[in-house]
Amino acid sequence: MAEDGESVIKIDSIFTTILEAPPSCIEWSKSAPDICVAGTYSLIESEGSDELGQSRSGSLVLFRLDGKSFTGAIEIYHLNSGHNISLERFLIIQAFDAAVLVLALGWHPSAEKSTEFAVSLSNGNIALLDYEKTPSTRVVQEAHSLEAWTVSWSYLDDTSNECLLYSGGDDSGIRAFLPEQLSNRIKDNDDDDRSSMSPIASAWNTKIHGAGVTAILPLMSSKPSTTQTILTGSYDEYIRVLTLNPRGVWKVLAEKRLGGGVWRLKHISNLEDNGIPSPTESSFYVLASCMHAGARVLEICQAGDETWSVKVMYKFEEHESMNYGSDATGLKGQEEGQMPSLLVASTSFYDRKLCLWSIPSLRRLPSTLAVA
C-alpha cells in the first residue's frame, strides 16, 4: 500500500482485548519484557455539574504474555516480576494543587540522579522533583502559556553528564532548559534572571509547529556534535527532525505528515537485532502513536550532518478511536536458535481497546495477553 509514494506494510493484530476503562498509556517492563502495564483514565461527571464538580479516576492494569496519576499527585510503583507478578505502590507525592493535572513524566537519564524526574502540568508549568527529597520541588513558572503536554531529557553532549530538559506545550512552543540554572520562578519576561543563562538553556520556539507540541524524543547521532538532534510530534500531524545548536537556534531538517496527531514517540532499539538492516551510517527506528490514524513504525535516517529522512515502514490501523499509547518489547526466542521477536502493544481510548501485533517477518510469538 502506498503512502506519499512509499511502500508501507499494513499490519494486523494477533490479539485484541477490551479494557474496563479507556486506556491512555502503555509500557513494557525493561526488566521483565513479557510484562506490560496499561494506564486508564476516566472523567466522572455528575448531572448538571460544572468543571469543579467533575472527578477523575484511573487504574493500572498489569498484563503478562500467556505461552500515571492525575489531580496534582504523583504515585510511584514497584513491579514484582516473579511468579506472582504485582504492582506495589510505595510512594505518593501530593506536589501540586488538586486542580492541576500531571500530563507527562520523564526520569532523569543519569544513574547518579535516578530518583529525579520532571513533570509537565496542565497549567503550563514544568516541575523538577526528587522523590528522596520531597517536598523539595523546583517549578519553572509559565514554561508554556497553555497545557505543557510533554517533557524529555537529553545529555548535553557525548562527554558530559550535564543534561538538557525539553518541554512542549499546547501553545505550539518547544523549549530547552538546563535544570541546574533554573530558579524557582523563571518567567519569559524576567530578563535579569535569564541573562546569566547560556543561549541553549533558554531556547524557545513557537514558529516551527502548526499546533501543540505533544511528543519530544532526543536522538543520538553517530557523529560527534555539539548540536542537539530531536524528534517532535504535534497535533498538526507532522513528525519533525529538529536540531538545536549551542547558540539556541532551532532548525527543521526533515518532516513528514503521518495522518493523525503525533501524540507519543518511542525508540525501538532492537530492529537490527531482528534482521532489519540499517541502510545508512546512522538510523533510528521509532514507534509513533498517531491518535485517530493508529500506530506507525518509522525509520529515521541520517545521511549527512543536515541530511535526514523519515520513512513509514509499517502501520497499524485496527483502532477505532484515539491511539494515545504504544510500546514495543523484544522477546528472546522460545526455541534454541530462534531469533528475538519484536512485539508491540497499542491502545485506543474511547473504544477501550488493547491490541498486540508484531513486525510481519517476526511472527513466531505468543498469541495472547493475560491480565495478571
Image (cartoon, rainbow, N blue to C red):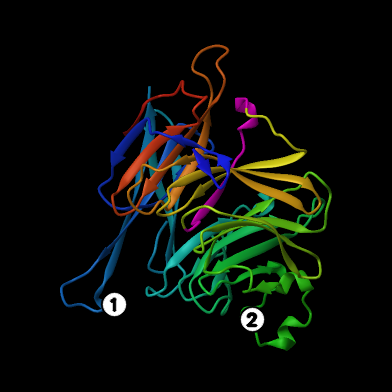
- The residues colored magenta run 261-275
Disc 2 is placed on an element classified as loop
Could you say where residue 102 lies in the image, as x and y percent from the top left? 45, 66
Q: Is mark 1 on a helix, strand or loop?
A: helix
- Residue 89 has which mark? none
Residue situated in front as seen by the camera: 180 or 265:
265
Q: Which of 118 and 43 is in front in this view?
A: 43
Dot 1 amino acid type: Glu
370 w.r.t. 200: above or below: above
Q: Does the magenta stretch include residue 110?
A: no
The residue under label 2 is: 186
Label 1 environment density (alpha carbons within 10 Å; few <14, some 14–19, many ≥20)? few
Residue at position x 37%, y 73% from top? 98
Residue 272 lies in the magenta stretch = yes
Position of residue 222 measured from the top left corner of the image (x, y, whole percent):
78, 44
Q: Are marks 1 and 2 in contact (CB under 8 Å)?
A: no
- Count the labels in the image: 2
Residue 371 location (% of width, % of height): 31, 36
Which residue carries the number 1 mark?
51
